[in-house]
Amino acid sequence: MSELNTIDKVAMYGGGGLVVLGVVVIGLIEIIAGSPHPVSGEGQIVHEALIPILLRSYIIILGLLIWAVYAVYKFVGTTPAAEPAA
């Protein structure tokens, strides 16, 4: 594999960082903060998140979109290496 250029690094660190932030870091914050999960009278668990679930999902989706755009760029923007003539 060739050396990584700026676009490769942005895709890896930006997309990967957002996915890790949304899944691992916010999950650990929720665990450490001890977000309550009370059970209602009907037995339904009411989830009260410290960080809104929509914000968490948008962070993860943004990371995945960065990866998707990078994949399309790599597919369309690069040409395969020419095979040597035998």
Image: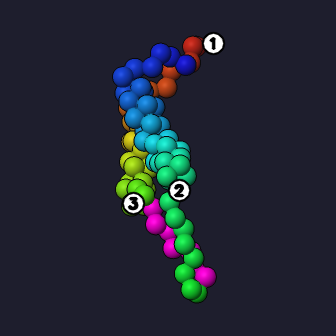
Q: Which residues are magenta?
A: 43-49
Q: Is residue 64 magenta?
A: no
* Residue to which mark 3 is pinned: 52
**Of callouts 3 and 2, which one flags the residue occurring earlier in the amino acid sequence?**
2
Residue 47 visible in the displayed image = yes
Residues at discs 1 and 3 in contact (Cβ within 8 Å): no
Q: Residue furthest bottom?
A: 42
Residue depicted at x 36% and y 22%: 6
Which amino acid is tagged 3? Answer: Pro
**What secondary structure is found at the residue carrying circle 3?**
loop
Q: Quadrant of residue 50?
A: bottom left
Choose between 44 and 11: the one closer to the eye: 44
Residue depicted at x 54% and y 72%: 38
**Is 46 rendered above or below residue 21?**
below
Choose between 33 and 53: the one closer to the eye: 33
* On-image quarter of the N terminus: top right
Q: Is residue 46 left or right of residue 66?
A: right
* Residue to which mark 2 is pinned: 34
Residue depicted at x 42% and y 27%: 8
Task: State how many labels appear.
Answer: 3
* Residue to which mark 1 is pinned: 86
| Predominant SS of the magenta segment | loop
Q: Label 1 vs label 3: CA separation?
A: 60 Å
Q: Residues within 10 Å of mark 2 (few under 14, many from 20)?
A: few
Q: Quadrant of residue 15?
A: top left
**What secondary structure is found at the residue carrying circle 1?**
loop
**Of callouts 2 and 1, which one flags the residue occurring earlier in the amino acid sequence?**
2
